[in-house]
Image (cartoon, helix red, strand yellow):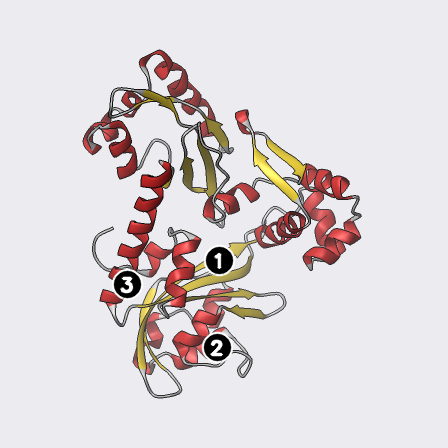
Amino acid sequence: MNGPVTASDLAFSSREFLRMIEEFGLTGHWGWTFATDEHVWSPGLFRLLGLEPGLVRPSYDLLLHLVHPEDRASIDTAAEVRAGLAREATVRVIRPDGAMRILSIRAEIYVAPDGRPQAAAGIVLNVTDREALVRARAVERRRKWALFEQTRSFTYSVSNFPIGNLPHELSVLTGLAPEILRSERGLIIAREERAFWIAFGNEYFPSGKPFIAKPLLMLADGQTARFPTVVVPTLNADGGIERWDNFVFPADRQATLPTDDLLRALQERVGGHHVRAARGLLDWSMHDLAAASGLSFSTIRRLEEDAEATAARSRHMAVAALRAAGIRFSLLDGGAIAVAKV
């Protein structure tokens, strides 16, 4: 990516990158559950705002209070966020020590099935020193390239099938120029399998379900090799597909899903029957899962009945508890999700 990084860019970045730049003091994130008025701030956000965790109670009003008076009109009020408004803004913030920071803020609203806003989450990026952000992005690119050079594995996202450019790694792997990849994607697949995998993609992408494809690719050295590709849709707040996350790796290597956006997107597809199966493998009751995940019994019951359509956070908490107890959710050929106890 060329140019300075903004909060919009970070929404599509890997969790490893976000953790790295939070450690650099460049970003932070927040969450707000409207029904309970619970606010959660990351350590990085406290650092950005010059506040000490544990000494102040996080709240959206506190964040607004720190915004320069001349910039407050450009950022959503608490009432507007509760009503479902989420604009991106770049504002000046005056820290308690008098230092000023310029912050780029982006938020998302999570709604109930009837359209009522239920919660908000946001990311805050320190753009005071844009050069530091450019350097951080360069570190991220080098990390990804080192992974590709060592393992020939890589991840990428496209906004929607078949829209979106394919990654530079795929161009290097196949020896095809980016403009050819954009216009004739099927050329990367061995001729004898090309028609099959094109039809396969045309069938699975519209379904909106995760799947694994294992095409035989034409490589730059004239050889062919099979490269399984795990494809998982990431959903937006309305339940629609925001983008498709892809993880590509050579068939002769053991590979697991990266523990970032791709894994999180797969967990969004874990259904009630998967949760029940996982409980059965652990010999857990719904009360046991509720205790382990920090959720209520009624929330677990709604999840297992697939009645909690918008409870992405609850689903992730339940899945995290099951994974911590030794359960693994894996994507199989054909898009089925398998449940196993490790």
Q: CA distance from mark 1 to mark 3?
A: 26 Å
Q: CA distance from mark 3 to mark 2?
A: 27 Å
Q: Amino acid at mark 1?
A: Ile
In this rendering, position of residue 49 left or right of residue 218: right
Q: Amino acid at mark 3?
A: Leu
Measuring from the top left, give residue 110's x and y in whole percent: 52, 55
Q: In the picture shown, does residue 94 fall above or below 291?
A: below
Q: Which residue is mark 1?
A: 109
- Whether the residues at callouts 3 and 2 have beta carbons within 8 Å, the answer is no
Measuring from the top left, give residue 9's x and y in whole percent: 33, 55
Which is closer to the viewer, label 3 or label 2? 3
Residue toward you, 78 or 212: 212
Secondary structure category for the residue under label 2 = helix
Residue 159 visible in the current orientation: no
Farthest residue in the bottom direction?
A: 97
Q: Which residue is mark 3?
A: 133
Residue at left offset 37%, top offset 63%: 21
Residue at left offset 41%, top offset 15%: 196
Q: Which residue is mark 2?
A: 61
Q: Quick one: label 3, few (<14), some, or many (20+) residues within 10 Å?
A: many
Q: Which mark is residue 223?
A: none
Measuring from the top left, give residue 297's x and y in whole percent: 76, 54
Which is closer to the viewer, label 1 or label 3? 3
Q: Quick one: label 1, few (<14), some, or many (20+) residues within 10 Å?
A: many
Residue at left offset 40%, top offset 51%: 14
- For marks 1 and 2, the one nearer the N-term is 2
Q: Quadrant of residue 181?
A: top left
- For marks 3 and 2, the one nearer the N-term is 2
